[in-house]
Image: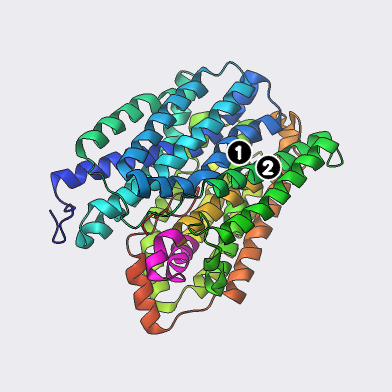
Amino acid sequence: MGTSGGLAYKSVAGRWVIAATVLGSGMAAIDATVVGIALPTIGRNFTATVDTLQWIVTGYTLTLAALLLLGGSLGDRFGRRRVFSVGVVWFALSSAACGFAPGSTALIVARVIQGVGAALLTPGSLAILQASFSQADRGSAIGAWSGLGGLASAAGPLLGGYLIAAASWRWIFFINVPIGALVLVLSERHVPESRDPNANGPIDFAGAAVGLVSLAGVTYGLIEGPEHGFGSPVVLAVLATGLIGGIIFMLIERASPAPMLPLTLFGERQFSVTNGVTLVIYAALGGALFLLPVELQVVNHYTPFQAGAALIPLTVVMLLLSVRSGRLAARIGPRLQMGLGPVVVGAGLALLIRSTGSRSYAAGVLPAVLVLALGLAITVAPLTMTALGSAPAERAGIASGVNNYVARIGSLLAVAVLPALAGISGQGYAHARELSVGFRRAMIVSASMCVLGGVIAAVGIRNPARSGRRHLEARARGHAHCALDAPPLDSEG
């Protein structure tokens, strides 16, 4: 046991808790990357159009993003282990439903349901670590969770590519069932229950419901608009519902005594600018990484396994450099790295244009991936530290959760709109020539968004005073995370 009565990092009990939380959150993280590898195969299996593939991705992200903060609140109120376990069971059962889906519509519905499970288990994994370990060992536990989670994210596409080639795309979902069963057993045996004793206000169900309707309306309009025309009465009505829902959501959050999304945090300039940069950067990444695995398989004729392996250097570089980047930002302030990093990310995305049609991984894809990885290593840790450090200490967990929420919304909207901007529609993704042209346009759009993010950071971010930098480093220690889908989520507080 630790000095403050919590678990010690080097204890057997502590290692079991880390194992349970890594496996649980790893299921959701792996799923986000593996499905991208499987999209061309799923598309051929169901003769799907590009908007169907968009819904397979965004259906999951939609409910995950909309209910993520609610999931953290439910854990704080009813027990983090309990809600985490419910999320694991929900995720595993809905994964099985995805695997058994007889058609694209059934798969999309199952993916929407799967996102609900992910929203319950994802915030709980880190909150359990925060509550279970002693203060002295908490940073080490979170660091281990982060590093192992990064390795899981790297291994996921490889495993998915192998399963697709050796068996079927359905096994990328079926494999979650035994993993979920193992996580459930570990959680029941080894994870201590914890709650937030101060979580006694009303739960913001109204905000979560209206937020989900708003996101669903906007997403539907952006995906279906190119197919049916943005002048279509149905598309206009759904878009209007989404926009009006967004306004109502803001009013609910402003009036709520315990809001899911505390709007008062955005009164701090540093926090608002950081989340603006987050929205732009993760939108660019989400859209680009949606199209890249498809492009590698359809245009460059990679196997699913090769497409999964293509991004391994990205995770490796971030694992090696992210902590160092965070330490540098703590010494010199985040402004330089948050201004420069997105531009480097944009350069990496622009270099991916050279990969189109090139069978040589070393000459075509690898240089772009390495530049992209360097840019993300420069950017992500300072961005996360600034999101945490620009809020009051007692609200650091909420600030990190909001930053994660913003990142997922950026990815959601980008996947919905980027194919249309790139001119990819219908079954055009299945034809190498049409996809190649569209992919180049998409990378130009994504790269431009990253440059915009760098400009916003350079103009809007302010370096804290030296004493503030030490405080920022202490607050953010252990929170650097290299997942591609979003910054770390911290539900404490």
Left-right relation of 85 to 29: left
Quadrant of the image occupied by residue 134? bottom left
* Residue 492 x, y percent position in the rendering: 36, 57
> Which secondary structure class fits the magenta region best?
helix
Q: Is residue 447 left or right of residue 9?
A: right
Residue 390 magenta: yes
Q: Amino acid at mark 1?
A: Thr
Q: Return the residue found at the far right.
A: 231
* Whether residue 154 is visible: no
Q: Is 129 left or right of 122, judged from the image as shown?
A: left
**Residue 29 image position (x, y, % from top left):** 44, 41
Q: Quadrant of residue 478?
A: bottom left
* Quadrant in the rendering for residue 292: top right
Which type of secondary structure does the marked residue at label 2 adopt?
helix
Residue at the spot of label 2 = 219
Task: Give the residue type at disc 2.
Answer: Thr
- Magenta-colored span: 378-398
Q: Are marks 2 and 1 in contact (CB under 8 Å)?
A: yes
- Residue at 43% x, 25% y is 93
Residue 44 shown in magenta: no
Q: Quadrant of the C terminus?
A: bottom left
Classify 10 Å Cα crowding around label 2: few (below 14), some (14-19), many (20 and above): many
Q: Of 351 and 180, which appears nearest the observer?
A: 180
Q: Position of residue 228 (x, y in %)?
A: 82, 34
**Disc 2/disc 1 C-alpha distance (Å):** 8 Å
Q: Residue 109: give x, y in percent of width and height.
A: 58, 27
Residue denoted by label 1: 58
The scheme the figure's colours follow is: rainbow
Residue in the picture at 48% in, 31% down: 305
Q: Is residue 181 visible?
A: yes
